[in-house]
Amino acid sequence: MPHISKTAAKNPDKAAIIMPGSGKVVTYQQLDNSSNQVAHLLRKIGLQTGDHISLIMENRSEFLEIYLGAMRAGLIVTPVNAHLQLQECKYIIENSNSKLLVCSEKYRPLAQQLTSLTTAVDHFYCLEGGGSLADWGKELAAQAEHPITDEARGWVMMYSSGTTGHPKGILGVVEGVSLDDLHPVLESMAQAFGISQDTTYLSPGPLYHAAPLGWCDMVLNKGGTVVVMEKFDAEKALSQIEQYKVSHSQWVPIMFIRMLKLPEAQRLSYDLGSLKVAVHAAAPCPIEVKEQMIAWWGEVIYEYYAASEAIGSTAIDSQNWLAHKGSVGKASYGKIHIVDDDNKLLEHDQIGQIYFESDATNFEYYGEPGKTKGSFNPSGWATVGDVGYLDQEGYLYLTDRKSFMIISGGVNIYPQEIENCLIINDKVADVAVFGVPNAEFGEEVCAVVQLADGINTDDELSQELIDWCKNKISRIKAPRQLHFIDQLPRLENGKLYKRRLVEKYS
């Protein structure tokens, strides 16, 4: 975005992007130059404002350089989850009408397969070039470093994780937002969390996910520095907070869990005193986990609730969370409504579907008007299918996704509560809970557990974990089935492919 050119003009040698694994540093002047070159190359190959492109690559500085260049050229950028299978990638690229695909060397084999599977894409590039893929780096180097003459505001189009059926392209274009401006929801978050030119932000998540990319966008827009971990590692994250004097960071609960499960002497050996804001989102955080994080890091833990659809958001700091444990906060953008299946407004403390009323509720599921319409109610409020309730003070509490709810013998059971119960057991490294068919009750609770290192599976352990649940939550919510698995199908953004587990164990 042009805002980086303003920082480049004032402080050209300031670090914009740091890749801690390699030690690579991209200054603001270099980022301004390279994003201009990207915009020129996009125009050279015939792409115009409103065209779509896709990126498949791991966390690296080029990801952000291409993204920012496309934003200056008015393009719609779709980052593709690099862990998807070939046919899943093909679906996203074709569904998004991408005219260009750029990959890294790591994903060259995948991209080369796509060249023969789809005719939708006009241009296939690899950062390093070679084979059937054009050389992005070589052609980029030949481009001018000044802005293109027809700069326009671009947008990102994320795809849902596809936990149920095909993923959906989420396009949220907001009219009247200039080249210099963030999306209104991102701007509200930047203000809420004090993002400025003094910010050093650690990004431990994958850039193909909305939150890490959005946070990097925020920090670069405000003139700060982003430290992008090539891949999350619990101890390396702590080390890099100390090394780079990180002031802000953004996490998902599973990252907290993995840091907390490091040996105590190891995790307490790092100086984390530079941290001012450590935000978590993407999934509800177990109360016990958050309590431990606040005890360890202090009251720098913040939480927000939002979605790629950018229909609204909430926020809460440590102090207010300690007084409202389990809440994701009050509305920070938009107004929250809780409604039942008949679209009737519910009272405080009643569980229903969460809707937001805001000026930003203009997203669409790309090419799927039926699904888009289904996300809005007659009042024009929008939902992403999450379920929860408001207390009398206006604090929102999440229970789960409506599509994940288990109905057993007429009782509504929310898997997140059971997952939160099991994950705090020292023998459990990760867990997924979902409903499976039961002839008598309709559905029953099934848990799939990934054990901590050094813990062996047996029938006694299975019953021990079931009893653990019965002692902590209602017995009717305890798993009737419990299976062990070596590795849960969890994405780097913290989300589970529950669909794969449901298909296997149903």
Image: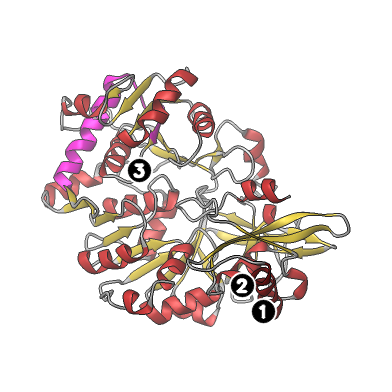
The three-letter code of the residue at mark 2 reads Cys
**What distance separates the C-alpha of mark 3 from that of mark 1?**
40 Å
Above or below 51: residue 381: below
What residue would you read off at disc 2? 421
Residue beneath the point at 74% across and 75% down: 474
Q: Nearer the viewer, residue 16 or 261?
A: 261
Above or below 9: residue 452: below
The three-letter code of the residue at mark 1 reads Lys
SS at mark 2? helix
Q: Position of residue 401 (x, y in %)?
A: 64, 56
State yes or no: discs 3 and 1 in contact (Cβ < 8 Å): no
Residue beneath the point at 44% across and 48% down: 209
Classify residue 226 as left or right of residue 442: left
Write down the region rendered in magenta.
Answer: 27-55
What residue would you read off at disc 3? 58
State yes or no: discs 2 and 1 in contact (Cβ < 8 Å): yes
**What distance separates the C-alpha of mark 2 from that of mark 3?**
33 Å
Residue 347 falls in image quadrant: bottom right
Q: Nearer the viewer, residue 61 or 339?
A: 61
The three-letter code of the residue at mark 3 reads Glu
Q: Where is residue 141 in the image (x, y as percent from the top left)?
A: 17, 28
